[in-house]
Image (spheres, grey):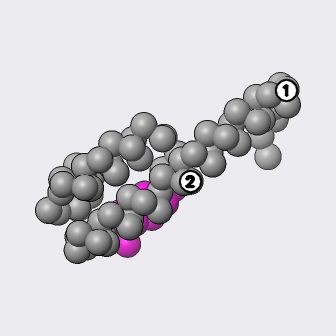
């Protein structure tokens, strides 16, 4: 368990995790709707990603991609 210096630090980290978590499902949903196969390893990578900026980039790329490698460069 992480040690926090303050309640505010804990709250900010929780908000960031919640934001990232809320972006993971849309990435997978867009890929699914577009018919793009997502290998298990890539699916797991998306589901554990915590960087909201990276998740946002993946979501944006997924809206126009034709393959998983266009979304995540080293997907395969």
Start-end of magenta stretch: 40-48
In the structure shown, which secondary structural element does the residue marked by tag 2 occupy?
A: helix
User: Split into 4 quadrants, where in the image is the C terminus?
Assistant: bottom left
Residue 46 percent coordinates (x, y): 42, 57
Which residue bears the numbered disc 2? 21
- Relative to 3, say whether 69 is above or below: below
Judge from the rendering whether residue 45 lies leftward or rightward of residue 70; answer left or right: right
Residue 59 percent coordinates (x, y): 34, 51
Q: Main secondary structure of the magenta part?
A: helix
- Relative to 51, say whether 36 is above or below: below
For image coordinates 67% across by 40% down, the residue present is: 15
**Front residue of 5 and 26:** 26
Residue 30 percent coordinates (x, y): 32, 64
**Front residue of 6 and 40:** 6
Q: Nearer the viewer, mark 2 or mark 1?
A: 2
For image coordinates 54% across by 47% down, the residue present is: 20
Judge from the rendering whether residue 44 lies leftward or rightward of residue 17; answer left or right: left
**Front residue of 30 and 69:** 30
Q: Is residue 46 visible?
A: yes
Residue 34, by quadrant, is: bottom left
Judge from the rendering whether residue 26 lies leftward or rightward of residue 14; answer left or right: left
Which residue bears the numbered disc 1? 6
- Relative to 19, say whether 44 is above or below: below
Residue 75, by quadrant, is: bottom left
Residue 36 percent coordinates (x, y): 23, 70
Residue 26 magenta-drawn?
no
- Relative to 19, say whether 35 is above or below: below
For image coordinates 29% across by 47% down, the residue present is: 60
Disc with the residue nearer the chain's start (2 vs 1): 1
**Front residue of 2 and 33:** 33
Residue 44 magenta-drawn?
yes
């Amino acid at each position: 368990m992480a040690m926090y210096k303050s309640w505010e630090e804990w709250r900010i980290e929780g908000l960031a995790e919640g934001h990232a978590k809320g972006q993971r499902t849309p990435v997978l949903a867009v890929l699914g709707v577009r018919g793009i196969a997502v290998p298990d390893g890539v699916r797991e990578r998306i589901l554990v990603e915590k960087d909201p900026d990276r998740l946002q980039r993946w979501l944006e790329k997924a809206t126009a991609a034709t393959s998983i490698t266009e979304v995540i460069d080293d997907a395969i």
